[in-house]
Amino acid sequence: MEFNYDPQNIFAKILRGEIPNNTVYENDHALAFHDIAPQAPTHILVIPKGPYMSLDHFARDASADEQVCFMQAVAKVCEIAGVDDGFRAIANSREHGIQEVPHFHLHIVAGRVLGRMLEQ
Ligand code: AMP
């Protein structure tokens, strides 16, 4: 699989400070911010700072440091958001996954019963 990262995607612009975001947490290699169109009371996106398009791209090519920082950011977000009653982590990927922004992001959604995993 060849990954051609588009540096003009909206999350790349957020990382460069060209577009504002509502930051929840940040570390050396990851940024977490509130989704602009929340689909649950808690809806936070965790993204790596590096140019990775999707979960499989990140898992294949990101360094151990980047991967550890990313997962530590996920843990922090869950702690900050207080998701003790449960949550869902979603990584929509490419066309069939209906991924809109081609920069890897993990949705952390919580705050209500979320229904079944897939609608169709
Ligand atoms: P996906 O369909 O998995 O690619 O999800 C992209 C997500 O990014 C959607 O939930 C959007 O609401 C969210 N989004 C798009 N632009 C922004 C932005 N500027 N700030 C925060 N979230 C955004």
Image (spheres, rainbow, N blue to C red):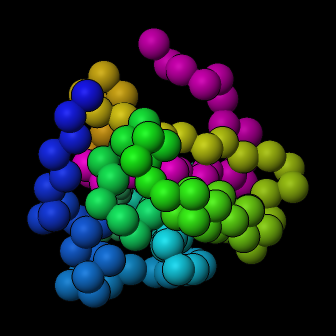
Give the farthest residue toward the top. 120
Residue for point 40% across, 70% down: 49
Q: Where residue 94 appears, x then y in whole percent?
A: 28, 33
> Quick check: 74 left or right of 29?
right
Q: Where residue 84 appears, x then y in whole percent?
A: 87, 55
> Quick check: 63 left or right of 51?
right
Residue 70 seen in render:
no
Q: Where residue 100 appears, x then y in whole percent?
A: 26, 45
Q: Quadrant of residue 74?
A: bottom right
Q: Quadrant of residue 70?
A: bottom right
Q: Quadrant of ligand 1?
A: bottom left
Give the farthest residue toward the right. 84
Q: Nearer the viewer, residue 66 or 17?
A: 66
- Please identify the quadrant where the C terminus is shown: top left
Q: Nearer the viewer, residue 87 or 28?
A: 28
Q: Check if residue 5 falls in the magenta segment.
A: no
Residue for point 72% across, 70% down: 76
Q: Check if residue 117 falls in the magenta segment.
A: yes
Residue for point 40% across, 59% down: 37
Q: Is residue 119 above or below residue 10?
A: above
Q: Which residues are magenta?
A: 101-120
Q: Where residue 99 appears, x then y in whole percent?
A: 31, 39
Is the magenta region chiefly helix, strand or loop? loop
- Please identify the quadrant where the N terminus is shown: top left
> Quick check: 79 left or right of 28?
right
Residue 93 seen in render:
yes
Q: Is residue 54 above or below residue 105?
A: above
Residue for point 64% across, 61% down: 68
